Image: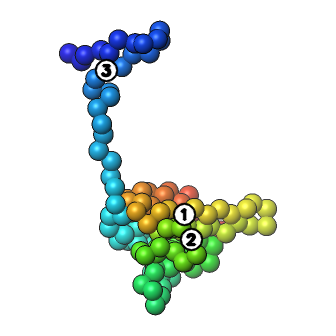
Amino acid sequence: MPVTVAPLSPGFSTTVEALRLREWQLGPGEPTIVMDQFTAEDFHLVVDDRADVHVNSADGRFYLGWFPLGRPGTHGDGWKIAVTGTAKVPGYSVSFDVETPAAVVAAAVSRILETSRRA
């Protein structure tokens, strides 16, 4: 039976179990779970002289950059995702820190790829 903590003010109560600390995934993890989502048929992959990895869609509208040592000119960006807009709808970009778990980036990439379609 859960122990209930008495509220300090009316309208709020919780259990000791709800107040326990959680464990969160930390650290960059394994970047291959991001990169494995791309096929050679639809995407171009380039590794540059800094060992940064760049992925572009065949149509050039999607870009993913992985910068293991941080993206030059930024404060710790490890991942950059950009989708070019159209004449009527602006594109977007998002950056993730070097220490962002690859699983989080993989989830974002997966969702972006799921929402794309051939024109």
Residue drawn where x is 42% and y is 13% of the image: 8
Q: Which mark is residue 27?
A: none
Furthest-bottom residue in this view: 49
Q: Mark 2 — residue?
A: 74
Q: Is residue 59 visible?
A: no
The secondary element bearing badge 1 is classed as strand
- Name which quarter of the figure residue 4 lies in: top left
Q: Residues within 10 Å of mark 1 (few under 14, many from 20)?
A: some
Instruction: Determine which residue is flagged by label 3.
Output: 15
Q: Please identify the quadrant where the C terminus is shown.
A: bottom right
Mark 1 or mark 2, which has the lower sequence index? 2
Q: Mark 1 and mark 2: span between their CA atoms? A: 10 Å
Residue 61 in percent (x, y) is at 63, 73
Q: Amino acid at mark 1?
A: Ser
Mark toward the viewer: 3 or 2: 2
Amino acid type, residue under disc 3 in the picture: Thr
What type is the residue that disc 2 sits on?
Thr
In percent of width and height, residue 96 lies at: 50, 62
Q: Quadrant of the N terminus?
A: top left
Residue at image point 45% right, 81% down? 52
Is residue 44 at least partly visible in the picture? yes
Q: Position of residue 60 (x, y in %)?
A: 62, 78
Q: Disc 1, disc 2: CB below 8 Å? A: yes
Is the residue marked by circle 2 packed among few (<14), some (14-19), or many (20+) residues within 10 Å? few
Q: Residue at x 42, y 60 (%)?
A: 100
